[in-house]
Amino acid sequence: MRCGLLGTGPWARRTHGPALAEHAGTELVGVWGRRPEAAAELAGELGTRAYEDPAALFADVDAVALALPPDVQAPLAVRAAEAGCHLLLDKPVATAPAAAREVAEAVERAGVAAVVFFTLHFGAGTAQWLRDRAAEDGWQVGRADWLSPVFGGGHSPYAASPWRREKGALWDIGPHALSVLLPLLGEVAEVTAARGGAGDTVHLVLRHVSGASSTSTLSHSVDPAAAGVTAEVRGASGVAQLPERQEEPAVAFGRAVDALLEAVRTGRAHPCDARFAQTVTELLHRADAQLPPLR
């Protein structure tokens, strides 16, 4: 499958680009970015060409991967779908519910496939854990905490990201937590959000339609010594804890490429499709509306 890459930041450079260039089932045709000089540099590193116009790239490929800030990603995803391109999207697809809905509707109108890179659903151990837990009934309580030091003194390539600075952990890593809780506990009836005392820390409480409940703590502001990802569900099957991730995101992204190829071949939607991503955006928007502005 002939693929294009939209985006030139650290995530594109470290994850999307290498995975697309190395995948046996894809040919990386070109790179587009908002800064032409960055697109030219990344294209050179990946052994492909830079495009000045995203429409020209859409015309030359079967699919595009988007590694862009969410509110830049969404309108370009709509344009790509309308041009007949399959989509490898990143989370969140947008921060406005209307924009996320437009992406999902464009995918359906065009009849293209879309896979959203919720990382845990494509990791070797975590993906199998999620499938196994989803096959079990009776989960009553869940917890998914994602604590990172991006703004807390860690040496992260994402610390300078303007959209992460503006939106904080709720929007950047909240999708990861929801991607664990929603498939296991079901649709959310009510969400309550509160901002913590440290930086962008947010606490969520979810009441699910099934009668289950769950909580999340999300932060980019913890000390490096306090960082970590934990998740568990409890119910009739006992206590199940999410295994630790053991691989680089680029390896997991390669499996997202596999998932897109499978969706194109079979016509079957992947669980992490544009409609699932729309649901995640809507829930995060409901939570964000309850919070004081991030300073």
Image (tube, rainbow, N blue to C red):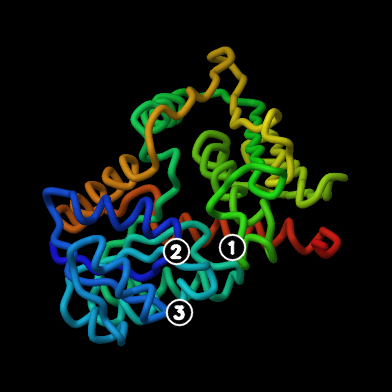
Badge 2: residue crowd in 10 Å (few <14, some 14–19, many ≥20):
some
Which is nearer the eye, 231 or 276?
231
Give the mark toward the camera: 3 or 1: 1
Above or below, 153 relative to 78:
above
- Residue at the spot of label 2: 9
Question: Residue at coordinates 47% horizontally, 73% vertically from top-left?
Answer: 74
Q: Secondary structure at mark 2?
A: loop
Labels 2 & 1 near each other (Cβ < 8 A): yes
Above or below, 44 relative to 254:
below
- Outermost residue toward the top in this view: 238
Question: Residue at coordinates 40% horizontally, 40% vertically from top-left?
Answer: 121
- Residue at the spot of label 3: 75
Q: Is residue 139 visible?
A: yes
- Residue at the spot of label 1: 161
Q: Position of residue 42 (x, y in %)?
A: 31, 66
Give the mark toward the camera: 3 or 2: 2
| Three-letter code, disc 1 | Ser
Question: Residue at coordinates 18% horizontally, 50% vertically from top-left?
Answer: 22
Badge 1: residue crowd in 10 Å (few <14, some 14–19, many ≥20):
few
Q: CA gap, disc 3 to disc 1?
A: 20 Å
